Image (cartoon, rainbow, N blue to C red):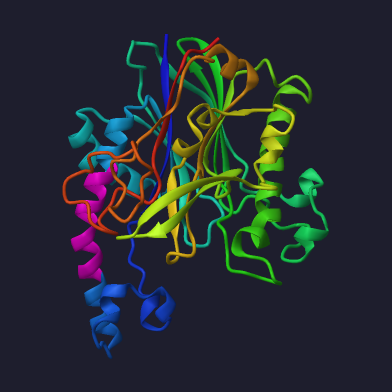
Amino acid sequence: MSLRLATFNVENLLTRFDFTGFRNQLRQDRVIKLFEVNSEGVYQQLEQARVIAATDDTRQMTALAIADADADILCLQEIDNMAALQAFEYGYLFRMVGNGYRQKFLVEGNDGRGIDVAVLMREETRDGQKIELRDIRSHAMTTYRDFDLFDEDLALTNRIDDKIFKRDCLELDLLIGGRPLSLYVVHFKSMGNPRDGLDGRQSTLPLRRAEARAVRRIIENRFGAGRTAKKSFAICGDMNDYQERVDVVGRRGAGYRFEHQTEVESALDVFSHDGFAENVVVRRQPLDRWTLYHARGPQEQHLCQLDYIWLSPALAAHNSGRLPEIIRNGQPYRTVFPPGQEVERYPRTGWDRPKASDHCPVVMTLDLP
């Protein structure tokens, strides 16, 4: 009996338009910046036309990436609401995959833009094992005080009664063919702007570290501290942090070289430092673990893993011979691939857009103990 589990940040699956760019040029799309638009009403019409025209190609590619993942359970990030998820599943996934995901779960979280985590599940695995939801819990309301996680680093930007999760930790208790699996779906705090001499990653690191500690606390509260290793659980999502990266050195035309680097610290050390959970993507070769390409000119470009499936020790050991897959066909052409990793991109993929997402789906085939 096998289960295919995947995670994917689909990026801004929204049902609404963002008109704030008329007054805040930092939020304005680069196409509209090319034109002189003096009326807010005209701006709104142009923004609507731009978004609608671009969305169909984008969501076809998003659906193709999900189809290639071929997951029984799919953890998603950046979903506006259930209406957006249902419209995407019916209008795109159903047509791309051939059958849809009957079970859909989303709880409104804390994100100021309204982007939430969600889960899509089939009724059965590909080999006919029933997928059942026993319980679902949101931890969006959990505060630093609740888990006694407040510290001096957090005090610089937060208060003790602030919510820990900047989106949510969605907990699902499942039965797969009668076997238990606990699933934790997250989208950690994004890397912000530089502050107090720290870059965007370092300045927001305390927030993500607290989120990781909270996820671990939730699991330990569920199973008992020191008794989690033998349980079957998975932590999935966009964690907006990495323990290693691949620096891309060079520029287009002159060629590139790729240098693997290990980070001194990461919020994800909370999961890995004592073997609490295993990042299964580490089973791949060091240059082949990335799920996102980051670039701000030739001097700042790297490949890194932001998207994760962490398995409990028991679940990881039971699947010790298996490698996770990373679906990169929806990446835009500007993404620099190390040698030997090139893929055939989806039709109509652009230099920067349209694209399936800046993120890549990660999928793992699992046997449950």
Q: Position of residue 172 (x, y in %)?
A: 54, 29
- In the visual, does 292 lie left or right of 316? left
Q: Which region of the structure is painted magenta?
A: 48-62
Residue 205 part of the magenta segment: no
* Residue 79 in view of the camera: no
Locate the C terminus by quadrant. top right
* Residue 318 in view of the camera: yes
Q: Nearer the viewer, residue 81 or 195?
A: 195
In this view, the residue farthest toward the bottom is 38
Q: Position of residue 12 (x, y in %)?
A: 38, 55
In this view, the residue farthest toward the front is 254
- In the visual, does 288 lie left or right of 206? left
Q: Nearer the viewer, residue 117 or 203?
A: 203
Q: Nearer the viewer, residue 137 or 326?
A: 326
- In the visual, does 194 lie left or right of 343? right
Residue 54 part of the magenta segment: yes
On screen, residue 10 above or below 364: below
- Quadrant of the image occupied by residue 253: bottom left
On screen, residue 34 above or below 360: below
Locate the N terminus by quadrant. top left
Q: Looking at the image, which residue is at 58% across and 68% down?
A: 193
- In the visual, does 54 lie left or right of 19? left
Number of numbered discs visible in the structure rendering: 0
Q: Nearer the viewer, residue 348 or 139?
A: 348
On screen, residue 52 above or below 258: below
On screen, residue 182 above or below 198: above
Q: Looking at the image, which residue is at 76% across and 66% down?
A: 156
Q: Position of residue 244 (x, y in %)?
A: 58, 44
Looking at the magenta stretch, what is its main secondary structure? helix
Q: Looking at the image, which residue is at 36% across and 75% down?
A: 28
Q: Position of residue 53 (x, y in %)?
A: 18, 62
